[in-house]
Amino acid sequence: MANRTPLYDAHVKAGAKMVDFHGWDMPLHYGSQMEEHHAVRKDSGIFDVSHMTIVDVAGIEAKDFLRYMLANDVAKLTVHGKAQYSSMLNESGGVIDDLIVYYFTDESYRLVVNSATRERDMGWINSVAASFKVTITE
């Protein structure tokens, strides 16, 4: 049996076709993709990210750590709760994965990374973090 997000029942009630996504029951679509597209354009939609990996980054070098590891500049984040989409980079500047980074303070951030690549991503995050004064909490 796959894991279920807190929104599972709401997805089923809304008519979602549920599929396995790396061990999670996730909605693939809600019937006609054209109707779904128009509904989102006319009103709104949500993307259930509650299956994704949440990583808190804290410490006096949190901003420097993220500026080293991410393509976009987290220094542009200055308002509590604001977020930035970015790519996590390897030491050569190649893309490892994409993620969302949330700003709390200059010493406290939250990353939302893909659950499908959790082990690889966490391995990289922890290996880079070893060179900075930061704490990584999953």
Image (tube, grey):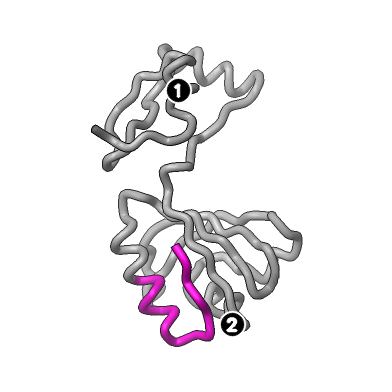
Image location of residue 79, percent across then percent down = 75, 60
**What residue do we see at 27% from left, 35% from top?**
2
Tag 2 near tag 1, CB within 8 Å: no
Residue toward you, 138 or 48: 138
Image height check: is 8 above or below 50?
Answer: above
Local crowd size for mark 1, using a 10 Å CA cut-off: few (<14), some (14–19), many (≥20): few
Task: Tell me which numbered mark, 2 or 1, is placed earlier along the sequence.
Answer: 1
**What residue do we see at 47% from left, 42% from top?**
50
Image height check: is 15 above or below 18?
Answer: above
- The quarter of the displayed image where residue 84 is located: bottom right
Magenta segment: 124-138
Local crowd size for mark 2, using a 10 Å CA cut-off: few (<14), some (14–19), many (≥20): some
**What residue do we see at 40% from left, 71% from top?**
125
- 6 horizontally vs 120: left or right: right
Question: Label 2, on which residue?
Answer: 61
Image height check: is 34 above or below 137?
Answer: above
Amino acid type assigned to the residue bearing label 2 in the image: Glu
* Label placed on residue 22: none
Q: How many marks?
A: 2
Alpha carbon separation for disc pair 2 and 1: 41 Å
Secondary structure state at the residue bearing disc 2: loop
Image location of residue 101, percent across then percent down = 56, 59
Image location of residue 113, percent across then percent down = 44, 55
Question: Label 1, on which residue?
Answer: 9
On whether residue 38 falls in the magenta region, the answer is no
On whether residue 125 falls in the magenta region, the answer is yes
- Position of the C terminus by quadrant: bottom left
